[in-house]
Image: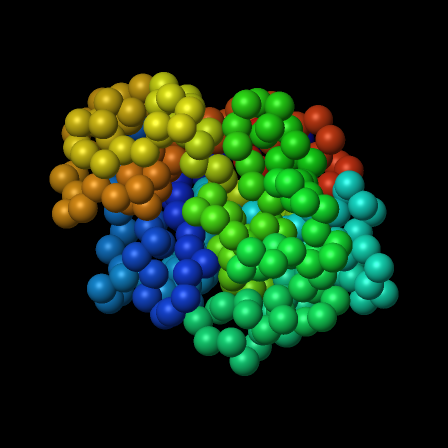
Amino acid sequence: MNAPTHFTRFAAIDWSGAKGERQRGIAIAMCELGDDAPVLIPPPGRAWSRAQAREWMLDQATNASPTLIGLDLSPALPFDDAGCYFPEWDETPADARRLWKLVDAMSAEDPHEAAISFLRHPEVSRHFRIQQIAGDLFPGGRGRLRLCEERQRDMQLLPSSCFNLVGPAQVGKSSLTGMRVLHQLGGRLPVWPFDAAPSAGPLIVEIYTSLAAREAGLPRGRSKMRDASSLADALRKLGVTQDHAPLARYDDHATDAILTAAWMRRNAQSAALWNPAGLDKVASTEGWTFGVS
């Protein structure tokens, strides 16, 4: 496919799978075409909730905004390596949309888009490492990876398995809450590559903030920006020529979102990133991280 050319706005959402309603780990940064620095979108209250972030995304669809929205989470679990999400379970979903529906339905009683009940299902829990306890079908080590995550590892990045829910680098909790939100969007906002990129209006893609950090010249393992100077230097590497608005707090979530929004603007029209090798094989089951070629 050709790269979509209609996007004029670029939003990066740093996501969170933490407990509770208000999430200081959620940050939304936006920029438009040009060389201005991305700005943080203020939350409706003291911090974003996952439901509010979902409604913000739906507003982009309602207004037909030409916004490329990056979500920093994995939209699906590994599938290709075993031919299914959950080996030995007859009810394993056949594709990502059925997975989203399952996670949301099984967790319907969990508040704030959490996925606790899903993980408590006896067939599901066999595949996860939860609170230092690994299910009997968790393979050990880093755990199962999606095809695009294997490609990330080839790029000398450090992907984490969504089946591992232990440790500061784990992404499984945020990804499962994100799957609930993707199902709740109800097809009103396309999600690439499960949906084709539209010729107008918004689109969601999966992002990996480490890709933005790498292109900005930040060293592996030391890619976090916690002061104005570090953020400004990184933004300049991505073509930003204007000063960014000072932040009340330079935390990882805000700076990651700001930098990645600028990176998305810089790379949105790269045809290679919309056509990575192997995508067709997993487009409906695992999805793909935009920026992994």
Q: Quadrant of residue 282?
A: top right
* Residue at the image point whose x is 62% and y is 23% from the top: 154
| Rendered location of residue 106, percent (x, y) | 64, 74
Q: Against 189, is 292 above or below?
A: above
Q: Nearer the viewer, residue 47 or 251?
A: 251
Left or right: where does residue 248 sit relative to residue 27?
left
Q: How many labels does the image show?
A: 0
Q: Quadrant of residue 212?
A: top left
| Rendered location of residue 105, percent (x, y) | 63, 74
* Residue at the image point whose x is 70% and y is 51% from the top: 138
| Rendered location of residue 292, percent (x, y) | 58, 29
Q: Nearer the viewer, residue 202 or 147?
A: 147
Quadrant assignment for the C terminus: top right
Q: Which residue lies furthest to the front in this view?
A: 132
Observer able to see residue 179: no
| Rendered location of residue 36, percent (x, y) | 25, 31
Left or right: where does residue 100 sit relative to residue 241?
right
Left or right: where does residue 249 sit relative to residue 156?
left
Quadrant assignment for the N terminus: top right
Q: Against 126, is 286 above or below?
A: above
Observer able to see residue 173: yes
Q: Nearer the viewer, residue 126 or 161?
A: 126
* Residue at the image point whose x is 55% and y is 70% from the top: 116
Applied colour scheme: rainbow
Left or right: where does residue 1 sit relative to residue 89?
left
Q: Against 83, is 213 above or below?
A: above
* Residue at the image point whose x is 60% and y is 44% from the top: 161
